[in-house]
Image (cartoon, rainbow, N blue to C red):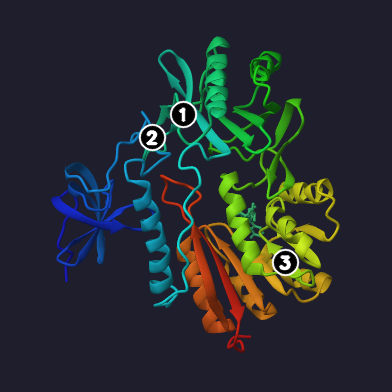
């Protein structure tokens, strides 16, 4: 049957719920339309942007009747800025929607009608929670400025004066760099013409230590006097580490080798009573307060008693493994980024932890070698990127058959399909799962799950 809508058609739609990814869900005689900028309970006028066989996509152009949970967004840059999607939806409705999305993914993709889902843990701070932000430079008539990509635009950057996701310090550092760039008469890089100089600014904060790290990313060439930039930034006593990185490709990137302009090469953050060194490109959960909550749940699910061999796969700078080390016999971490592994090893030393080892490698390839080194794991913690456990990693983990897997996920859809494979092919049952909201006003949701091997594997 042909879809009942056509591209560019104007529709009046009632939004029932929020889909994973942040679009409103409306139904037109059963046919699903995903509506960007539609919130639950809204009646909107929407223009159809894409039509597929089973669903269509649309953009809300006018809210005809606002839903009951719409609120005033506090940020002056909302909704033009692409950083936040739901500042105008009451926070309780945001977390309810996220909890529903995890349940829905486990039901549809994981085949679990009645998943053992625990209530979502809401964020402790609804604003000012991020410990890292990456800004883009753009050229305004009166000089270069800094901000975020406009919602839905990769090619346009919106100047930001005050971002509600960072701290007063983070805002002040960004605005100081903007003033510095103007004083220096430097031009922002233009993606299209590939001309100009200033590209990105990264600001990281150790939220529990009060230390800050700044990375300026430019096109090639030494066109500024670093002493003056350092002088401006050192007016903030929190700034301990200032770096410069050169991006000589047209691609937008900030994950680049850096040169220290001033200070230490990294800063420290404190999580769960341990100190962690954080360098420009090393992975750290971007909400420190909720990372502690997330790790607390992982710790509870791991249920260690001091005798276990624990694997921390996709370990970043070792945060999860090191917070578990005092309750484990040994901890073994694998991480693809060598910079993060170097930090993880340093972090073990920094905290006097002697029963943890970390190795650089791709989980899919490295687990068999790890098995030879460590012996069979009792508990495997996995915290993969959004793509989840890639086929090889999943297969090899299934074959290794640890009695207990604690799966920390940032994507309920890949979590659900991995849970299905672990159950159907490797005999694991999902025992507990708890969503955690680390990123209010964005579509992201984390979830910690406990899987136990209860049956014999069907695959080999
Ligand atoms: C979601 S982060 C988790 C980091 C850490 N567990 C934490 O809580 O800070 C995922 C990590 O996996 C790493 N990674 C991505 N793909 C990988 C792979 N195939 N093998 C090993 N590590 C990988 C990334 O560099 C990143 O540090």
Residue at (58% x, 88% y) in the render: 458
- x and y percentages locating residue 415 in the rendered image: 51, 66
Of callouts 3 and 1, the N-terminal one: 1
- x and y percentages locating residue 212 in the rendered image: 65, 31
- x and y percentages locating residue 206 in the rendered image: 65, 37
Q: Is 427 left, or right, of 259 in this rendering?
A: left
Q: Is 241 left, or right, of 181 in this rendering?
A: right
Ligand 1 under 8 Å from disc 3 Cβ: no
Contact between labelled residues 1 and 2, with CB atoms less than 8 Å apart: yes
Residue at (56% x, 49% y) in the render: 290
Q: Nearer the viewer, residue 215 or 209?
A: 209
Closer to us: mark 2 or mark 3? Answer: 3
Corner quadrant of residue 86? top left
Residue hosting label 3: 311
Q: How many marks?
A: 3
Residue hosting label 2: 81
Residue 147: mark in rendering: 1
């Amino acid at each position: 049957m042909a879809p009942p809508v056509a591209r560019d058609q104007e529709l009046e739609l009632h939004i029932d719920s929020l889909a994973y990814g942040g679009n409103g869900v409306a139904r037109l005689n059963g046919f699903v339309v995903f509506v960007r900028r539609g919130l639950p309970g809204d009646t909107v006028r929407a223009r159809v942007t894409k039509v597929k066989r089973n669903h269509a996509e649309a953009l809300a152009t006018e809210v005809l009747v606002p839903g009951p949970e719409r609120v005033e967004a506090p940020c002056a840059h909302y909704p033009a800025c692409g950083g936040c999607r739901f500042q105008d939806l009451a926070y309780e409705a945001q977390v309810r929607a996220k909890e529903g999305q995890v349940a829905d993914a486990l039901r549809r993709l994981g085949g679990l009608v009645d998943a053992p889902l625990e209530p979502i843990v809401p964020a402790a701070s609804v604003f000012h929670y991020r410990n890292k932000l990456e800004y883009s430079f753009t050229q305004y008539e009166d000089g270069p400025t800094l901000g975020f990509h406009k919602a839905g635009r990769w090619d346009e950057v919106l100047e930001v004066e005050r971002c509600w996701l960072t701290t007063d310090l983070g805002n002040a550092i960004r605005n100081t760099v903007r003033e510095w760039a103007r004083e220096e008469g430097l031009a922002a890089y233009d993606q299209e013409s590939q001309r100009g100089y200033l590209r990105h600014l990264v600001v990281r904060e150790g939220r529990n230590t009060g230390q800050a790290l700044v990375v300026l990313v430019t096109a090639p060439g030494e066109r500024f006097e670093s002493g003056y930039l350092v002088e401006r930034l050192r007016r903030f006593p929190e700034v301990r580490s200032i770096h410069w990185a050169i991006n000589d490709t047209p691609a937008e990137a900030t994950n680049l080798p850096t040169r220290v302009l001033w200070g230490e090469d990294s800063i420290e953050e404190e999580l769960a009573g341990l100190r962690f060194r954080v360098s420009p490109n090393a992975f750290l959960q971007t909400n420190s307060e909720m990372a502690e909550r997330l790790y607390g749940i992982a710790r509870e699910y791991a249920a260690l008693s001091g005798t276990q061999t624990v694997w921390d796969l996709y370990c970043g700078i070792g945060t999860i493994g090191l917070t578990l080390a005092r309750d484990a016999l040994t901890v073994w971490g694998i991480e693809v980024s060598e910079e993060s592994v170097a930090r993880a090893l340093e972090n073990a030393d920094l905290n006097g932890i002697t029963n943890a080892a970390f190795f650089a490698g791709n989980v899919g390839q490295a687990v068999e070698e790890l098995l030879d080194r460590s012996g069979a794991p009792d508990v495997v913690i996995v915290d993969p990127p959004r793509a989840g456990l890639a086929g090889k990693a999943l297969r090899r983990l299934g074959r290794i058959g640890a009695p207990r897997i604690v799966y920390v996920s940032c994507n309920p859809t890949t979590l659900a399909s991995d849970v299905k494979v672990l159950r159907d092919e490797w005999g694991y049952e999902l025992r507990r799962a708890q969503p955690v909201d680390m990123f209010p006003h964005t579509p992201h949701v984390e979830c910690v799950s406990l899987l136990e091997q209860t049956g014999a594997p069907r695959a080999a």
